[in-house]
Image: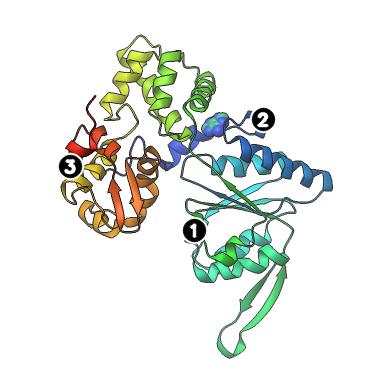
Amino acid sequence: MNRLRLVGPQEQGSEEQAFQGSLRPSFLKEYIGQKTVVENLSIALEAALHRGEPMDHVLLYGPPGLGKTTLAHIIAQEMGTRIVSTSGPAIERTGDLMGVLTNLNTGDVLFIDEIHRLSRVVEEFIYPAMEDFQVDFIVDKGAFAKTIKVPLKKFTLVGATTRAGALSAPLRERFGLFYHLDFYQVEELVTILRRSAAILKVDLEEGAAQETARRSRGTPRIANRLLKRIRDYALVRGDGRANLPAAQEALAREGIDELGLDRQDRLYLRTMIEVYKGGPVGIEAMAATLNEEVDTLVDMVEPFLLKTGFVIRTPSGRRVTEKGYRHLALLPPDGSSQLRLF
Ligand code: ADE
């Protein structure tokens, strides 16, 4: 499977990171969508600033591409502090974290992406850092081993995870604030696209903005990426304006359909239908048939298919819904009873 999906929710390399970074809002007032999260976060920020104290530790959870990293940067920006970013898989040993933690100043944000992927040892090392702002550092080995308590400045840990359920309970309980990010509405994505187009100096027409938003899977990161493709297509094959025909043509070329599904999504649905009679089927079996990691399917493919209602999760496994069959222009099994004819 192609790792670099145009509609893949993950950031794809340093070039894309710079591109998406240039479109990222720096302050809460510029942030579009996630109204409840933004409101609650702004109360927490204002209260912390008022008291002159660092913010409580924050856990952000939800599918990739919805703004967890952006919000972590905004928290630091609004608090007037620095942010240090890392990720669960990048911290292999407690020693990796020691230097980072001891270099943090009061109020600094330590952002740990994919925090559910921290090793148990590292996770346990973090508990006293979060709770008492100190770490137990072990020096020497064997009989000479001793623990020294190293004091830390009062920092704010911002953790991001795609699956709150994958986080161990003791870690989850150490966060004071939890915010769930959900997929964006089309109108919110249109507003984000207009903002991005203005920054990129792209002449984005209304029809194209609507069309792009509809195909962006509720995800700003994808919307911005599609905008870039449409801009390039309009420049090379069109008249430079990002209008509806340019948007439709550019996206069709990439295999992205009217609802934003790409070839990988359709392959998932088709496999479930053709190999497993539409389910129910376990995720391990699907992963094996698609030659894919379970985590990739769970984190990258399924969230949007579940959101669109093309797939459901039942106690006995995943199933394609009638809506899913219809999207591929296929008849559901016992179609005569399920498919109403008007
Ligand atoms: N760019 C990406 N996500 C955004 C958001 N939520 N608001 C404004 N601009 C964005």
Of residue 29 and residue 97, the one placed in the foreground of this image is: 29
Query: Would you name the residue on which mark 3 appears?
Result: 334
Disc ID at residue 298: none
Q: Outermost residue, bottom direction?
A: 143
Image quadrant occupied by the N terminus: top left
Do we see residue 250 in this rendering?
Answer: yes
Quadrant where the C terminus is found in the figure: top left
x and y, in percent, of residue 329 in the image? 20, 31
- Badge 2: residue crowd in 10 Å (few <14, some 14–19, many ≥20): few
Is residue 227 visible in the rendered image? The answer is no
Q: How busy is the neighbourhood of tag 1: few (under 14 within 10 Å), some, or many (20 plus)?
A: few
Q: Residues within 10 Å of mark 3 (few under 14, many from 20)?
A: few
Q: In the orientation shown, which residue stands out farthest toward the top?
A: 239
Please, what is the three-letter code of the amino acid marked with disc 1?
Gly
Dot 1 lies on which element?
helix
Query: Residue 233 or 7: which is nearer the viewer?
Result: 7
Kindly identify which residue carries mark 2.
Answer: 29
- Ligand 1 near label 1 (Cβ, under 8 Å)? no
Q: Position of residue 222 (x, y in %)?
A: 42, 33
| Residue at x 58% of width, y 70% of height | 124
Q: Position of residue 33 (x, y in %)?
A: 57, 32
- Mark 2 element type: helix
For label 1, the residue is: 165
Type of amino acid at the residue the image marks with label 2: Lys
